[in-house]
Amino acid sequence: MNFKELTTLFIILVATLSVGISCSSEKQNNFVPRDPMPLDEIEYSFIHMDEYLPTKIIEKAEQPFLFARKENITLPEEFDHNGNTFSTQHYIDSSDTQGLLVIQNDTILYENYWKGQQENIQHISWSVAKSYVSALFGIAIEEGYIKSIHQTVDEYLPQLKGSGYEGVKIKDVLQMSSGVKFDETYSDPQSDIQQYWVGFVEGDSQDEFAANMINEKTPGTYNKYVSMDTHVLGMIIVKATGRSLTDYLEEKLWKPLGTEFDAYWLVDAQGMEMALGGLNACLRDYAKLGRLYLNKGNWNGKQIVPSAWFESSTSATKEHLQPESENSSSPGMGYGYQWWIPDGNEGEFMAMGVFNQHIYINPTTNTIIVKNSANKNYYEKDNPYASTKTHLELYRKIADMSN
């Protein structure tokens, strides 16, 4: 086996930290972690994560909210991006799509599954989970557990004094502008994200990992995607509320949104949730976060996420957060409070995770699109079948066609 193949297998060890499970409500205790499946089997591991790592169950609503439904529409035959024309079905196949859901005006227009996923099987969210953490943070502020995003991280987490997070305002962490040094290169076994994942599998503390971070930039001046920022937000929620992320999510979001199925969150050996990417849920239940945010935090007349929090979460409020900013590591994509803001069509925003997990929201056409994938070629440079921007053009074509 050559170095490239070894690196690929190592990436899979990372990948399965965020993988799915069948919709069981049985809680797991004393789980013994084990290594994941090879890269060519991630379409299985992404929907069976309970076989690899311990989890906490998030119980479904007693009275589920059901979207209206029509017979599946015919998706656009093709779409264009950067002067290239793509066959929609070929794009779906080539990006290893496992679930695709299109909702417009509260009505399911298209729902389909491939590669083992079914309507009642949870799929890993990866970093889509970050947007859920953001919602919980806004709720915790509204409930008085957290005073202000202008406080510093170490006011809530004194164990992070002396780390790169000391003196950093919570707002800068929410906007991925903490200034913390963190290498998110998945293809490099020595990167911070790889070291984090390996430690997670081996039972190391995520909190201790955060405490070892150092600073490299002035906070609030540069938008750099740092997954550890979301873990720190999760730590603050747990400290301030006295609740686990699982319990808080279940009470404040999962049950109020009328979810149909249980979800689950991956946890480390200390019982702390993988806030930055370990949430696993079923396709239609992911869409309910989309519906909540499409309606500016309101769910059937009840304001669940404060409207002001919604506005700030889905707006790029500073120069370095703008899609075209030179002070950003993600050109073409703006950033709010753990939500992505694409360049181009005004009003769009997304929750997004690696291997092409997406919740796309288009207020202009009243559209929600959810995609789960196990894209084996995700890290190929310039691969259009892994590109977020190419996915966006597909979503825009579907939204415009359906409207």
Image: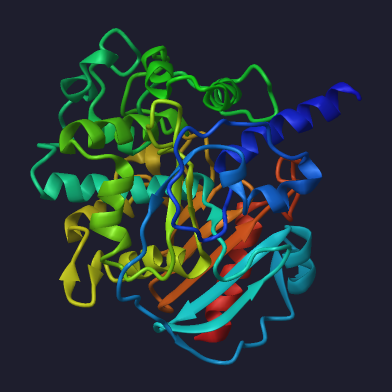
Image spot of residue 316 (x, y percent): 34, 48
- The vertical placement of 389 against 330, above or below, is below
For this view, does 201 lie left or right of residue 150? right
Task: Pick whichever, 140 or 55, lies toward us.
Answer: 55
The quadrant in which residue 58 appears is: bottom left
Nearer to the camera, 18 or 212: 18
In percent of the image, x 56 and y 31: which residue is there?
32
Where's the N terminus, which quadrant? top right
Residue in the image at 51% along x and 22% along y = 203
> Eyeballing the image, is 213 above or below 301?
above
- Which residue is located at x 62 percent, y 28 percent? 185
- The residue located at (66%, 52%) in the rendering is 387
Which residue in the rendered view is the most extreme toward the right?
A: 1
Q: Is residue 226 visible?
A: no
Q: Estimate the x, y position of residue 48 in percent, counting from the top left.
A: 62, 50
Left or right relative to 217: residue 154: left
Residue 239 in view of the camera: yes
Tally of numbered discs: 0
Say whether residue 212 is left or right of residue 194. left
Return the residue nearer the eye: 179 or 11: 11
Residue 376 pos. (x, y %): 75, 47
Judging from the image, the colouring scheme is rainbow
> In the image as oriented, which residue stretches furthest toward the top?
162
Compared to residue 230, the image places residue 50 above or below, namely below
Residue 227's spot in the image, x, y percent? 46, 33
Q: Is residue 90 above or below residue 355?
A: below
Instruction: Residue 151: name its quadrant.
Output: top left
